[in-house]
Image (tube, helix red, strand yellow):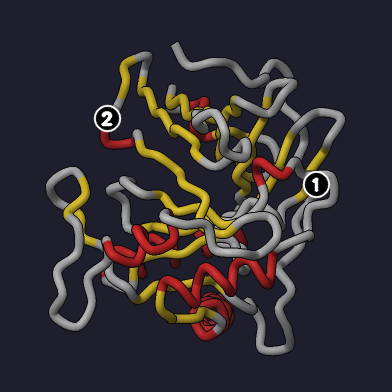
Amino acid sequence: VLLLSGAAATCWVAMIVGGRHTLTADAAARLLYSKSSGKSPGLPDALRGVFWMSDNPAPEMLSSLDGGVFNDHKRVLSITLGGPFGWSYSSSTCGFIGWLSFAILGCMCCGRGRFTFNEDFSIGRIGICVCGCVDIYRLAHVDMTMEDVTQPGLEPGTTWLRRTSICGSEFDGGNYTLRKIIGTDGHELQPNFDAMLASLSSDGKPGVFIKGWMEKPLQQIVSGSRWPCGDGEIKCAPVQQVMGQGAHAHP
């Protein structure tokens, strides 16, 4: 039984790894948009498009929230961790480990990222839920928020500030700015798109060191088809809303 279980797990992980894409950041951004755009009916335009985690020191860089399950009545967006065409990770050892960890967590534990917003969708609280309802961030006393800080004259949702606190104390390593690089209509947003590319290392060209220690490569990893037969993701039980987890402003 153990041998069979081990063989099944090995094949399962091999299929996840085999379904990934490794491509340049500009191609990765366009892929995320083309595969995810319009997949979350009712999602506000401020949350659609492709975002660049411009000064995030972790080995992840691009994200698309359009593709998750959106409940407009509760203002909750749920996305599968490591799910297809939702995120990009650095094509490096750290990036690969991060990508694979989230992909396995998303499958084995029905891991979901859950975003709960206030009434005008300007502030959201971020949680990671496993087994349908357990928010591991809340259990660990980690508070993550995102706030729309777009300058006047620009489309809402162009710039978001991500804040992190642990046990009530702000954690600077988890704070960064999300900048939209592909708009809701699929067009590149300048100067953000070119600034993203200019910050990356490639072919001997050094990249920008984020917060003094993390340099990100042009090559990115994106989850694609989990199984050889198509682009579909493994389906989990519906995520249950945890009472009392409304969005709130960061102090």
Residue 108 in sight: no
x, y percent for residue 188: 54, 63
Q: Could you tell me which secondary element the residue under label 1 belongs to?
A: loop
**Residue 238 - label:** 1
Left/right placement of residue 56 relative to residue 151 reads left
Q: Could you tell me which secondary element the residue under label 2 belongs to?
A: helix
**Residue 224 - label:** none
Tell me which residue sits at (46%, 64%) in the image: 88
Residue toward you, 97 or 37: 37
Label 1 neighbourhood size at 10 Å, few (<14), some (14-19), many (20+)? few
x, y percent for residue 218: 32, 73
The relative height of residue 113 versus residue 240 in the rendered view (above or below) is below
Left/right placement of residue 107 relative to residue 88 reads right
Q: Quadrant of residue 245 in the image?
A: top right
Give me the C-alpha separation between circle 2 and circle 1.
Answer: 33 Å
First-in-chain label (2 vs 1): 2
Give the quadrant of the C terminus. Answer: top left
x, y percent for residue 74: 81, 28
Q: Quadrant of residue 121 in the image?
A: top right
Q: Which residue is mark 2?
A: 172
Tell me which residue sits at (36%, 17%) in the image: 167
Q: Amino acid at mark 1?
A: Pro
Q: Which circle, 2 or 1, is nearer the viewer?
A: 2
